[in-house]
Image (cartoon, rainbow, N blue to C red):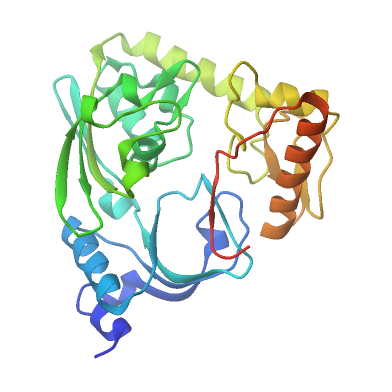
Amino acid sequence: MDFLSELYNIYDRENIFTDEPMNIHTTFRAGGPAKYLVKPALTSHIIDTIRLCRKYDVPYTVVGNGSNILVSDKGYDGLVILISDELGRVEVNGKRITAGAGAMLSKVANAALKASLKGMEFAAGIPGTVGGACVMNAGAYGGEIKDVIVSAKAVDRDGNILDFTVDEMELSYRHSIFADNEYIIVEAVFELEEGDVAEISSIMKELAAKRREKQPLEYPSAGSTFKRPTGYFAGALIEEAGLKGRGVGGARVSEKHAGFVINYDNATAADILDTINLVKEEVAKKSSVMLECEIKFLGMF
């Protein structure tokens, strides 16, 4: 048997893809195909896939909603484990919400709203999954995952299931123990506070309006392209360097929010990367600050 044949022993046929275009699985809407892509519906699928990749020395990576990655135009010569809504169960029990890694943060926030639980409002507009949010300690408008998460389950690179308390996750700005060790989140538990449905709904609507006003939601992007430098705001530095509207090929620095590099007009991944590098070079010249990318890169650039 070969690698692909053994994949069919793990997954139903409809959950295995070859030469799968990654531009349909990323919010940048750019990049080439993955050699293999699978959609696990069970934690055991993830474990079996990792062990199979090790057996055949096939590189693999994990993708959720693809809201934080740029895939090379050459694609990815390995296997993508797509953590999607098949692993997106959300259950409310008292003040706690248990969510599968594939659940969108908006789904969790809406479940909290329906249960009159407050604390998750900040996450309603973040276009990511629970798994990705935990890995990056996602945050917005003063809230972060570390403020609401209490525990999580993850799979390590040997296929073992590990349990973490919030103190063991080492959560800080865009950082976690999961990112450091390439653990795959499979489930997270959040603990919220009792609140008023109308008040929670009002806050969510207010934050959604702020996003529409300040962010270029009409264009494909990966959200904030750069991490916040200590003592500065990336968007302000980029604007001060006169970079709004500038770019390479079909990629641009957003006119609405300079912290966003957008796919303005059928940009390639190379266009986006060249624009990112242009921004980094110009900001370094102007402000002597070296910007660090918040997004991850997949494949050969």
Q: Quadrant of residue 75?
A: bottom right
- Residue 178 visible in the shown view: yes
- Front-lying residue, 139 or 226: 226
- Front-lying residue, 205 or 120: 120
Q: Quarter of the image containing the N terminus?
A: bottom left
Count of numbered tags: 0
Q: Is residue 140 left or right of residue 47?
A: right
Residue plotted at (33% across, 50% down): 182
Vertically, is 278 above or below 285?
below
Vertically, is 278 above or below 80?
above
- Front-lying residue, 284 or 93: 284
Q: Is residue 104 left or right of residue 160?
A: right
Vertically, is 261 above or below 157?
above
**How far across and how far down the image is residue 31, in percent?**
61, 62
Residue plotted at (44% across, 40% down): 128
**How far across and how far down the image is residue 260, in percent?**
67, 36
Q: Is residue 178 left or right of residue 247?
A: left
Which residue sits furthest front? 288
Q: Quarter of the image containing the C terminus?
A: bottom right
Residue plotted at (75% across, 27% down): 288
**How far across and how far down the image is residue 126, in percent?**
47, 33
**How far across and how far down the image is residue 68, in percent?**
51, 44
Which residue sits furthest bottom? 1
Residue plotted at (29% across, 21% down): 148
Q: Quadrant of residue 166?
A: top left
- Residue 268 visible in the shown view: no
